[in-house]
Image (cartoon, grey):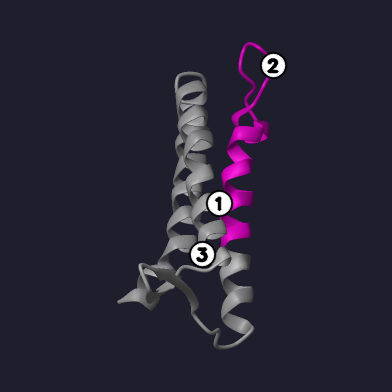
Amino acid sequence: MTATPDGGSALRAPSAWIPLVLAGGATALLAGYLMTGPHEPTMVIENGIARPDESATARLWQLLMLGQLPFILYFAAVWLPKDRKRAAALLAVQGAAFVAAALPVILLEA
């Protein structure tokens, strides 16, 4: 493992692993929601008209997915100039985790 001049490593940076943890949490949240069976839609009444609304699970999933982006951008900005090879590999892993967490939702809506 090659260390940068300041003694750090891209593999040990928290900004490398936090997006992976958030993507795992989003995937686990989605899996738990799907495994607990069919759910009644949350109904919202606007101007006397009832319409289905997203559940709290959907909103939390969206926040987990959105929360990854600042960490990924920070990691890329800090580590690509320092350790290009490892940073690029970790960015690929972060991107794959993001897509893996989003893919079930995309497929279920199609």
Q: Please tell me which residue is depicted at 68% across the width and 33% down the height of the picture.
A: 12
Q: Tell whether 13 sits left or right of 38.
A: right
**Toward the viewer: 29 or 53?**
53
Q: Quadrant of residue 73?
A: top left
- Work out whether mark 2 precedes mark 3 in sequence or the reverse, and give the earlier one: 2
**Toward the viewer: 8 or 103?**
103
**Toward the viewer: 4 or 49?**
49
The residue singled out by tag 3 in the image is: 58
**Neighbours of disc 2 within 10 Å: few (<14), some (14-19), many (20+):** few
Q: Tell whether 29 sits left or right of 97.
A: right
Query: For the residues marked 2 and 1, what is the alpha-carbon distance in whole angstroms?
Result: 31 Å
Query: For the residues marked 1 and 3, what is the alpha-carbon distance in whole angstroms?
Result: 10 Å
The residue singled out by tag 2 in the image is: 7
Q: Could you say whether the residue bearing mark 3 is in a helix, strand or loop?
A: helix
Compared to residue 98, the image places residue 31 above or below, namely below
- Work out whether mark 2 precedes mark 1 in sequence or the reverse, and give the earlier one: 2
Q: Is residue 15 magenta?
A: yes
Q: Is residue 18 magenta?
A: yes
Q: From which residue to which does the magenta span run? A: 1-26
